[in-house]
Amino acid sequence: MAGASSWVSELEDEVGELPLSTRLSIADALTLGNAICGFMAVYFTTTGVLVPHLMGTSDGAMSKHSAAGAVTLMLLASVFDLFDGLVARKLRSSAMGAELDNLSDLISFGLAPAYFVIVWGIVSDDAHGKIAAVAAVMVVLAVVLRLARFSCTTLRDGVFQGMPSPFGAMTVVSLVLLELPFVPTIIMIVGVAWLMVSRVEYPKPRGRLALITFCWTLVSMGCLIAWTIGVPGGHSLLQAGAALQCCAAAVIPCFATTRRVNTFRANRREARTQAAR
C-alpha cells in the first residue's frame, strides 16, 4: 500500500509540473470539436449509408437523412475551424494549437469528404467504386500535402496558398450532392484536389469575410435541413446551394489569377518606366 501511495503521489507531482504551454485552451477545445464532428461524419456515412446498402436494406441511393447528417457535421466542423482561429487570436492557444488544428482538419476536411466520395461510388447506380476511390485518395493526399506545406512555409498575412481545406471539402461534397453524371463529377473532384495544392492565393476569412463565411455555412445547413424533412422545393434549394458552392470554387481562382496577372503586368510596366529614366 505504501508503494502504491508513493507511486500515485509521484504521478500527481509529474502532472502538476506540466508546462502551461501543453494545457488545453478554449481555442484548443474548439479544435477538438472540429475533430469530433469529422469523425461523427464518417460514422453517419458508414452506419446510415454504407451498411444499409451492403445489407440490402437501403433504397439503392444515398440515405437522405444520414447523408444530410454527415454533411451537416462537416459544416459544423468548418464552424469550429473558423472560430478556433478567432478565439486563439483574441485569447491564447497552447503550443499544441497548430498541431491540433492540422490533425483535426485532416479528419474533418480530408478523411470525411474522401470517405463520402468512396461511399457514393459504392452505393450509386451509375458510379464506379474503384474510380471513386482513386479520386478520394487524391483528395486525402491533397489535404495532407496542403497542411504540411502550411506548417513549414510563411506567406504574407491575410492569404492562404491553395484552396483552404474546409472550402475544398464542402466543394467536394457539393459536387456529389449535385447528382451530375459520374465522369464530370470525378473530373471536378480531382480539380478541387489540385486547387488545394495549387499556388492560387485565397483570402483568409477575417472580419467581414469571416461573417459572410459563417452566414453561408448557416444557409447551407438550412438547405440540408429543408431537403431532409421534405420541405416543398427542398431538393431544388439543396441543388441551388451546392451549385453556388461549386461556382464560388470556380470563380475565386479565376479572380485571384486575374489579379495576380494584373499585378505582375503593373510591376513590369513600373520596372520599364524606372529603367527608361
Image: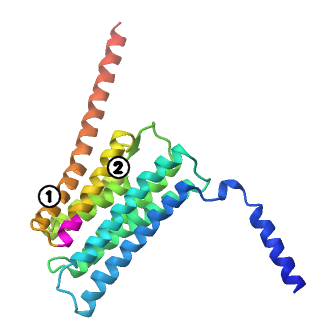
Q: Tell me residue 152's x, y (percent).
A: 52, 49
Q: Tell me which secondary structure the magenta stretch mostly adopts.
A: helix
Q: Is mark 2 on a helix, strand or loop?
A: loop
The three-letter amino acid code for the residue at tag 2 is Ser
How crowded is the residue under tag 2: few (<14 C-alpha within 10 Å), some, or many (20+)? some
Residue 201 can be seen in this image: no
Q: Tell me residue 210's x, y (percent).
A: 36, 45
Q: Nearer the viewer, residue 203 or 77?
A: 77
Residue 60 can be seen in this image: yes
Q: Nearer the viewer, mark 1 or mark 2?
A: 1
Look at the image and give the residue range highlighted in magenta.
224-229
Q: In this view, does 133 lie to the left or right of 127?
A: right
Look at the picture and state if 86 lies above or below 51: above
Q: Residue 198 carries which label?
A: 2
Look at the picture and state if 239 lies above or below 4: above
Mark 1 and mark 2: Cα distance apart in space: 27 Å
Q: Residue at x 14, y 66 (%)?
A: 234
Q: Quadrant of residue 146?
A: bottom left
Q: Tell me residue 106's x, y (percent).
A: 44, 63
Q: Is mark 1 on a helix, strand or loop?
A: helix
Look at the picture and state if 71 lies above or below 79: below
The three-letter amino acid code for the residue at tag 1 is Ala
Q: Is residue 226 magenta?
A: yes
Q: Is residue 95 left or right of residue 181?
A: right
Q: Quadrant of the N terminus?
A: bottom right
Q: Tell me residue 170's x, y (percent).
A: 29, 60
Q: Residue at x 61, y 53 (%)?
A: 94
Q: Which of 46 and 115 is in front in this view?
A: 46
Q: In which quarter of the image is the C terminus?
A: top left
How crowded is the residue under tag 1: few (<14 C-alpha within 10 Å), some, or many (20+)? some
